[in-house]
Image: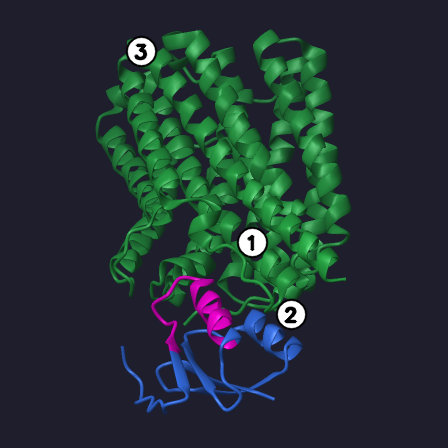
Amino acid sequence: MHPNLSFEQAPPIGVPYRFFLTAPWFGVAAGLLLAVFGGEMLASRWTPGTLAATHLLVAGFMLQAMCGALMQFVPVAAGGNIWRPTWVAGAVHPLLIVAVSLLVAAFLSMHPPLFIAAAHVFLVTLAFFGVVVSLALWRTPARGATIMALRIALLGLLVTMGLGVTLATGLARGSDLPLLTLTDVHVGWGLGGWALMLLAGVSYFVVPMFQLTPAYPAWLARGLPVMLLLGLLAWSAQLAGLGENLRMGILLFGLAVGSAFAVGTLYLQSRRRRKVSDTTLLFFRTAMLCLLAIFLSGLLFAVRPDFWNDPRAAIWIGMLALVGVFVSAIQGMLYKIMPFLNWLHLQRLCGLNMLPPTMNQMIPERAMRRQYYMHLLGLALLLLAVWQPALARLAGLVFAIDCVWLGLNLLQAVRVYRRFKAELEHKTAAAV
Amino acid sequence: MSGGPVNPTASCVVIDGREMQPPEPLEKALAALDTLPADGELLMLLYCHPNPLFNILRNNGFVWQEDIRDDGTHEIRIRRA
């Protein structure tokens, strides 16, 4: 059975859209960076280009899309009232663009004042965003696994930001802190505590609703956030010192929890009531298969430490996680959410007098499907380029094209929305 | 798919939206309401409580009755007020 939605609480359409429409262009920038730097960028996770491109994806593409999704999802699906959403989005959206731009410039130039500036803007913006959304989530009368996952995800975002600010100031001013270990904890909270937690919480809602699958079983839906949180707390204990075997064991535990979510989602999709494969389903399947591949890679690295010691192993995992799991899942979600929001907002404007364009007219299925194939090609090339650096420039270029195409398809939905709204206003004016 | 028989009458339009992706059931319902005769009835079968549809019905002079079957199907009978 589907959960209920309360669209009366939905924010103005521009609130989520400003985030959604910005996200793809950070992906374009990351792809172009790889196209410029080439194979040297994939030699190690610590090169300036790698750090810059990684943050273009996580704090640019992913964070924009996820903040926009929360601004829409929390009031509509979780029943939480976000304080002045238009004002919050109007402040957070540009500040995040500034923060990411400063951080990327800092990594590329290694100029200390830029790290300090980026850290301050991130701190102010995400602390403000975190408090506003947390208040809405704590005050909502709604209960359930989605709410629990969203609350932990917000905690994950704030911990990630706190660690990131510490790292940035440490890089700028020097620090006695173990920055490499701190980075691993920062990555764990960012990808597991924030991104995967949010993806799971939203999936509990949208996968059954849009992909017509049975609901996630309660033990999985409630168990996953708790297990992931326990894994992250254990992972954070490395700041106090942990043996290498224990560290690898905790990592494998976290990856196993992630793979349980992937297997559960793939199983539910195999039992969906309507056996038509739309593009969102394909994007989601790709994301879940990549999540599974990360766990299998982790197992391989555990039994073959010589592979794990290769600097490219971390790049391989990162590529699977960022482009394979999160960029794929976000692209699929955007293709479902934007036409759906278009339709709902237009329908509210026209009542029964005029029917809004159908979902398929907002972004044609063929356009989304072709872009999905480009995304698959980009992902395959990026994964190959980890081991064949000669492919890096081509992979970067194809990924940039993938994201440009996504951006243009999303703009197409906005054009349809604007055209129909103008037509409606014209008819209303003529009738008066 | 389970659930009891629907028994539509001549003036009853049935939309089984249980295997449709949102907002397809709502799209079909709006098209059907547009041409619903004065004594006609629209029967919708869904797996959810469609708040957006109820707001539209309320604002456009329709009344409805909602029953929930054992299998979770929401049976919604809509008429002109």
* Contact? badges 1 and 2 (CB < 8 Å): no
Which is more foreground, mark 3 or mark 1? 1
From the top left corner, tell me how far across and down residue A13 is, in percent: 64, 50
Q: Amino acid at mark 2?
A: Pro
Q: Residue B42 lies in what quarter of the image? A: bottom left
Is residue B24 covered in magenta?
A: yes
Relative to residue B16, is residue A48 depicted above or below?
above
Q: Amino acid at mark 3?
A: Pro
Few, some or many residues within 10 Å of mark 2 (<14, 14–19, 20+): few
Q: Give the spatial CA distance, label 3 vs label 2.
A: 52 Å
From the top left corner, tell me how far across and down residue A405 is, in percent: 44, 30
Please give the chain letter of the residue carrying mark 3: A
Q: Is residue A366 left or right of residue A227?
A: left
- In the image, B32 versus A408, the foreground residue is B32
Q: Which mark is residue A341?
A: 1
Q: Residue at x 71, y 55 (%)?
A: A82
Q: Residue at x 56, y 21 (%)?
A: A179
* Hue used for the chain lettered A: green
Relative to residue A400, is residue A358 depicted above or below?
below
The residues colored magenta run: B15-33
Q: Quadrant location of the N terminus of chain A?
A: bottom left
Please give the chain letter of the residue carrying mark 1: A
Q: Residue at x 31, y 36 (%)?
A: A294
Q: Earlier in the sequence, mark 3 or mark 2?
A: 2
Q: Which chain is blue?
A: B
Question: Dot 2 lies on which element?
Answer: loop
Tag 2 residue: A141
Is the same chain shared between marks 3 and 2?
Answer: yes
Please give the chain letter of the residue carrying mark 2: A
Few, some or many residues within 10 Å of mark 1 (<14, 14–19, 20+): many
Question: Dot 1 lies on which element?
Answer: helix
Tag 3 residue: A389
